[in-house]
Image (cartoon, helix red, strand yellow):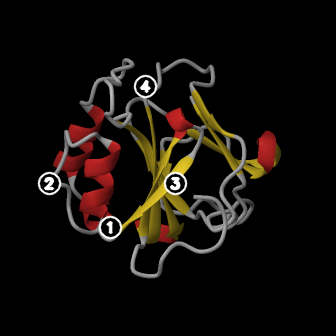
Amino acid sequence: PGGGQPPPDRRHCTVDLASGGNVRCHHTFTEVIAYATGGRIADAPHSAAAAMADAEFHRRLNALPHAKSRSAGQKAGVVLSVEFEHDQYNGRSTTFFADHGCDGDADVDSVLPAITRWWIDTIISFQTYVECQANHFEHSNYGGARTGPLDSTRNIGPTMNDRTSSIQWS
C-alpha cells in the first residue's frame, strides 16, 4: 500500500474503499476479482481485457448484492469499477470495490479523495458496475477538470487522459 510502483509481476491491483483505500496487487485478473468479491466470483477471465469483452462476467458482477454485506473477515465484495492504464481496457488495471454498490441516484455513494502515487495520472479507460457512474477528477479532493459521471469509456478523452487524481462513484 502507499507509494512506489506495484511489483512488476503483479499488473492488476485492488483498492478496498471500505477500508480507506488499502491497495493489494495480484498476478492475474482472476485473483483480483476473487479477492474483491470475497470469493463469490472465483472464475473470472485470466486477463482484464478478456473480462471486459465477456457479457456473462459483467452480468455476474452486476448481480452481486448492492447492500452492505460485509461479514467478519470477508472482503467488501462489490466491485464499483475497473480502471485501465490504456484505452480499450488494456494494460495494468485497478479494481475499486466497497461494501455497497451505488443506488442509481445523483448523490455520491463512494469516494477516493486521493489516488495512490503509483496509479495517479494513469487512467485512460474504465468500466463501472452495480449501478455506479464514475466521475474522475484532475486533482485530489475532487478539484480541477472532471469527466462528469460516466458508466464506462474506452478512452476518457484528451482533457482527462492520464490526469485522474481522485474519483467519486454515484
Q: Residue flagged by tag 1: what amino acid is it?
A: Ala
Viewer-nearest residue: 27 or 52:
27
Q: Image check: 97 left or right of 108?
A: left
| Residue at the right extreme, as displayed | 144
Q: Residue flagged by tag 3: what amino acid is it?
A: Val
State the mark number for residue 136.
none
Q: Image check: 22 left or right of 9?
A: right
* Quadrant placement of the C terminus: top right
Q: Residue flagged by tag 4: what amino acid is it?
A: His
Between disc 4 and disc 1, the foreground one is 4
The answer for how far apart the CA atoms under marks 1 and 3 are is 21 Å
| Tag 4 residue | 100
**Secondary element type, mark 3:** strand
Between disc 3 and disc 4, the foreground one is 3
Percent position of residue 75, x then y:
35, 37
Sort mark 3 into few (<14), some (14-19) or many (20+) by Cα contacts within 10 Å: some
**Secondary element type, mark 2:** loop
